[in-house]
Image: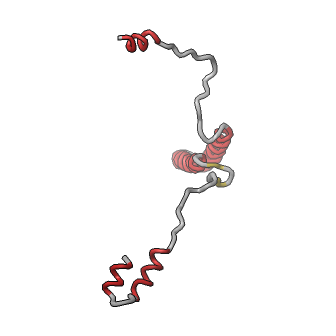
Amino acid sequence: MGRILSILGIGFCGYQSILWGVMLRRFSIYKGLQKPLVYRGFKGKFIGWGIGSLIAGIVAGGLIGALSSMYFGGFITLISIAAGISYTFHRQKSGLHDKARAKGVFIHPINLKKKYAAYIS
């Protein structure tokens, strides 16, 4: 790019110094969070679970309050939010990624006869 600009502008081109600054500018690269996302004790996906339990509790309590009694709806709201948050904290203790942990001894069958027969023929 510098060669073309120096040919177009006779001798030293004044525009080349402007473009050099643009070409040499370095931009930082976003590499992710580098730390697990934590908000008020909730980590990672459990933040969404906590927000979901809040919304579900408010909606359930609002519907029950509208259909029956305002006090009963408020009570249901408090109970459902508390149950959802406590369930979320309980699930968070088991880890961020749920893995099936099967207990027992597993024996995988090996069929050497089929593989061996393919090499012989």
Tell me where residue 42 appears, x and y as whole percent: 65, 49
Depth check, front residue: 107 or 71: 107
Hey, which quadrant is residue 85 in on the image?
Answer: top right
Q: Give the residue drawn at x 68%, y 51%.
A: 41
4 relative position to 89: left or right: left
Query: How are the colours assigned in the image?
Result: secondary structure
Tell me where residue 69 appears, x and y as whole percent: 58, 47
- Screen quadrant of the N terminus: bottom left
Q: Give the residue drawn at x 43%, y 12%.
A: 116
Depth check, front residue: 19 or 2: 2
Q: Give the residue drawn at x 38%, y 11%.
A: 120
107 relative position to 117: left or right: right
Tell me where residue 97 appears, x and y as whole percent: 59, 39
Visible residue check, residue 42: yes
2 relative position to 105: left or right: left
Report the residue that reaches farthest toward the front. 11
Q: Give the residue drawn at x 49%, y 74%.
A: 24
Hey, which quadrant is residue 86 in on the image?
Answer: top right
Reply above or below: 118 against 102: above
115 relative position to 97: left or right: left
Tell me where residue 19 appears, x and y as whole percent: 42, 80
Report the residue that reaches farthest toward the left. 8
